[in-house]
Image (cartoon, rainbow, N blue to C red):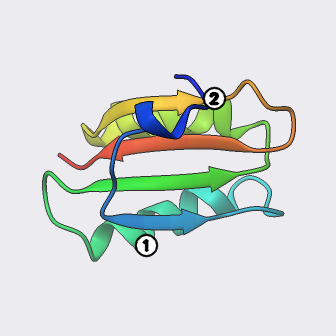
């Protein structure tokens, strides 16, 4: 996924987990998606490199669709998840 804002998916909710480390970003994601409905898109901002492994596994385990991710920056990681 490019960093060009024109190519980024639109989203319904934002979760900023900057400064948090495993397992906190995933725990906060679990809490956030509980209040969302199927088909909505969640944008997640993270700084923990472990999220590059954990977010795709979270999506796979729960059946959510990882629409895109931008892990090219060494300081911020972006994820766009469509809820199952």
Task: Say which mark, if any, is on residue 59.
Answer: none
**Residue 60: x percent and y percent?**
35, 30
Q: CA distance from mark 1 to mark 2?
A: 19 Å
Q: Earlier in the sequence, mark 1 or mark 2?
A: 1
Rendered residue at 35%/31% (across/down):
67
Quarter of the image where one finds residue 30: bottom left
Q: Is residue 70 left or right of residue 61?
A: right
Rendered residue at 27%/40% (across/down):
64
Residue with the mark numbered 1: 31
Q: Residues within 10 Å of mark 2 (few under 14, many from 20)?
A: few
**Residue 26: x percent and y percent?**
57, 55
Q: Is residue 65 left or right of residue 15?
A: left
Closer to the camera in the image, 60 or 76: 76
Q: Is residue 60 left or right of residue 21?
A: left
Q: Secondary structure at mark 1?
A: helix
Closer to the camera in the image, 65 or 74: 74
Quarter of the image where one finds residue 45: bottom right
Residue projecting furthest to the bottom: 35
> Could you tell me how many numbered marks the image carries?
2
Closer to the camera in the image, 33 or 40: 40
Q: Secondary structure at mark 2?
A: helix
Residue with the mark numbered 2: 53
């Amino acid at each position: 996924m490019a960093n060009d804002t024109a190519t980024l998916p639109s989203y319904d909710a934002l979760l900023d987990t900057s400064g948090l480390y495993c397992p906190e970003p995933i725990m906060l994601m679990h809490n956030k998606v509980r209040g969302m409905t199927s088909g909505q898109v969640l944008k997640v901002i993270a700084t923990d490199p472990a999220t590059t492994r954990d977010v795709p596994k979270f999506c796979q385990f729960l059946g959510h669709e990882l629409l895109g991710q931008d892990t090219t920056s060494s300081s911020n990681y972006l994820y766009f998840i469509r809820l199952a």
